[in-house]
Amino acid sequence: MGATVRIDLEAADPVWRQIADQIRAALVAGRIKAGARLATVRELALDLGLNPPSRSALRGG
């Protein structure tokens, strides 16, 4: 993705919302260019060290 994504498992916002907000902010700030390849759900989950049940949380359910 070219930008660092950080999640807080203790936060009130779900994981998917934290990730979406960070990607949106990176796009607005120009840290991610339009058309850039983003990590797949699997790649992102592995990079973040999430276990399989948490991976489904990336998709919002």
Image (tube, rainbow, N blue to C red):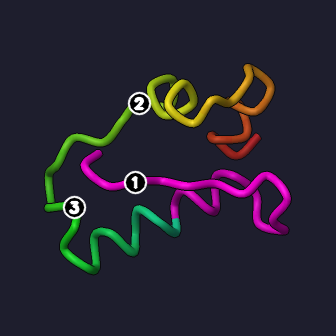
Q: Residues within 10 Å of mark 1 (few under 14, many from 20)?
A: few
Mark 2 or mark 1, which is nearer to you? Answer: 1
Res. 55 image quadrant: top right
Residue 15 falls within the magenta-colored stretch: yes
For badge 1, the amino acid type reads Thr
* Label 1 residue SS: loop
With 38 as the anchor, is 19 left or right in this view?
right
Is residue 12 shown above or below 54?
Answer: below
Q: Position of residue 32 (x, y in %)?
A: 22, 61
Going from N to C along the chain, the mark reached first, 2 or 3, is 3
Residue 52 in which image quadrant: top right
The residue that mark 3 highlights is: 32
Disc 2 residue crowd, few under 14, some 14–19, many 20+, Cα 10 Å = few
Region rendered in magenta: 1-20
- Out of 3 and 40, give the one closest to the viewer: 3
Q: Which residue matches tag 2? A: 40
Q: Residue 16, how many percent across, how many down? A: 64, 52
> Which residue is rendered at x = 28% and y = 70% of the image?
27
User: CA separation, marks 2 and 3?
Assistant: 15 Å
Q: Position of residue 14 (x, y in %)?
A: 76, 57
Of the pair 49 and 36, the residue shown nearer to us: 49
Residue type indicated by callout 2: Thr
Q: Position of residue 54 (x, y in %)?
A: 75, 33
In the picture of the structure, the residue carrying the numbered disc 1 is 4
Mark 1 or 3, nearer chain start: 1
Frontmost of labels 1 and 3 is 1
